[in-house]
Amino acid sequence: MLKIKYIILIFIFSFQNLFANEYFLTLRNDKVNLRQGPSFEYPIKLFYKKKYLPVLVQDRFENFRKIIDHENNSGWVHISQLSKKKAAIIVGDDKLIFSNPSIYSKPYAILKQGRLCQIRKCKENWCKVKIEKFEGWIKKDGLWGLL
């Protein structure tokens, strides 16, 4: 009876891991091809022209990864075109960058929706970001590109 319980638990945990395999990466280059299928033989759906754009990896096949971007475009990208650098896009309303991870600290700048920012580090509900000459803290709920 105990063996059956262990088998059921192992099955449940491995079944949950099938859905927990999504993770974020960023585009490595300024020009990346999004393809309809997992091979260079498939036609190109669109070109990405923004380095460090965050994408959600949903599936894999050999050296290709199925991705989805912040605008719900999906397709396949070769793994050589992806990077582990952390970045995010501002979603929703305009967001403020603060000097410290608190809404009571000094605000530095206002970020418009769709703005790309590099992630330096994250704490609980805040992330330290860098955008051109500005570096500061922003609330996580305003960012797309983090799990």
Image (cartoon, grey):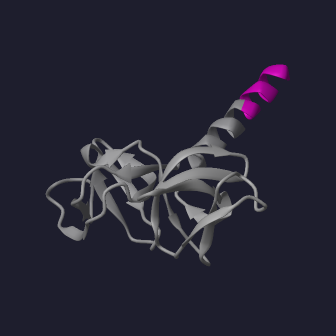
Residue 69 versus residue 65 in the image, above or below: below
**In which quadrant of the rendered view does residue 63 lie?**
top left
Q: Is residue 82 visible?
A: yes
Left or right: 12 with respect to 122? right
Q: Position of residue 79 (x, y in %)?
A: 29, 44
**In which quadrant of the rendered view does residue 47 lie?**
bottom left
- Please, what is the dominant secondary structure of the magenta stretch? helix
Left or right: 94 with respect to 51? right
**In which quadrant of the rendered view does residue 49 lie?**
bottom left
In the rendered image, the residue lying farthest to the right is 1
| Residue 54 inside the magenta-drawn segment | no
User: Which contiguous range is marked in magenta?
Assistant: 1-9
Going 38% across and 59% down the picture, which residue do you hit? 53
Going 75% across and 32% down the picture, which residue do you hit? 9
Q: Position of residue 64 (x, y in %)?
A: 29, 48
* Number of marks drawn: 0
Going 29% across and 49% down the picture, which residue do you hit? 28
Q: Quadrant of the N terminus?
A: top right
